[in-house]
Amino acid sequence: MWSSLLLLFTWGLSAQANAIDSYFQEYVEDEQFTVVYISPRVFKFVDDLTRDGLELDDEEAKAFVDVAADMRGLRILSTDVTPTKYYEEAVAKIDTKLYETLITIRDRDGGRTELLLRENTDGKLEELLFLSHGDEEFTLMSFVGDLDLNKVMKLADEMEEENR
């Protein structure tokens, strides 16, 4: 019985990953979208460089490398054409109930931004999903890997400090 439940749970997570993959693949060649895909190999390359003794002076770069070492992939889709339509479509296709909401921002103009996380069966952070839309743009970002939320927050802090 337990193996059946575990198989069903694993299949559910796999189906969810496939929903994001499917949504991403649907628009990867669409000229209306800006598309970014960074493969696991790039993150391994960054990790190998740091293990080989690459030293970084910049705190933001160090924080990025620290997060990148744990990542297996990054996908970004963005468009300024009918952003609300694409946001609603993404939310309908991606079962956001499998994620825990970290941040939700709704502005008075109807825009919405959500930062969601998904943990694996061991309780480790496996994916950060960012969904955002407003009058001008829709963006979906999926960060996948064995992520450490403290490292991610440190990177966010360093990026915010750099922009001040």
Image (cartoon, helix red, strand yellow):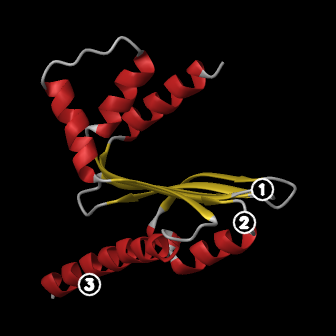
Q: Quadrant of the N terminus?
A: bottom left
Q: Are marks 3 and 1 in contact (CB under 8 Å)?
A: no
Residue 106 lies in what quarter of the image?
A: bottom right
In the image, 3: left or right of 147? left
Give the alpha-carbon distance from disc 1 to disc 2, as whole Å. Answer: 7 Å
* Cα distance between the residues tagged 3 and 1: 39 Å
Tag of residue 8: 3
Q: Which comes before the other along the chain, label 3 or label 1?
A: 3
Q: Label 3 to label 2, Cα distance in Å? A: 34 Å
| Mark 1 nearby-residue class (10 Å; few <14, some 14–19, many ≥20) | few
Residue 147: image location, x then y, percent: 32, 45
Residue for point 18% across, 87% down: 4
- Disc 2 on helix, strand or loop? helix
Amino acid found under the numbered disc labelled 1: Glu
Q: Which residue is mark 1?
A: 136
Q: Are marks 1 and 2 in contact (CB under 8 Å)?
A: yes
In this rendered view, identify the residue nearer to me: 19 or 99.
19
Residue 110: x %, y % from top left: 82, 61
Q: Which residue is mark 2?
A: 83
Sequence order check: which comes first, mark 3 or mark 2? 3
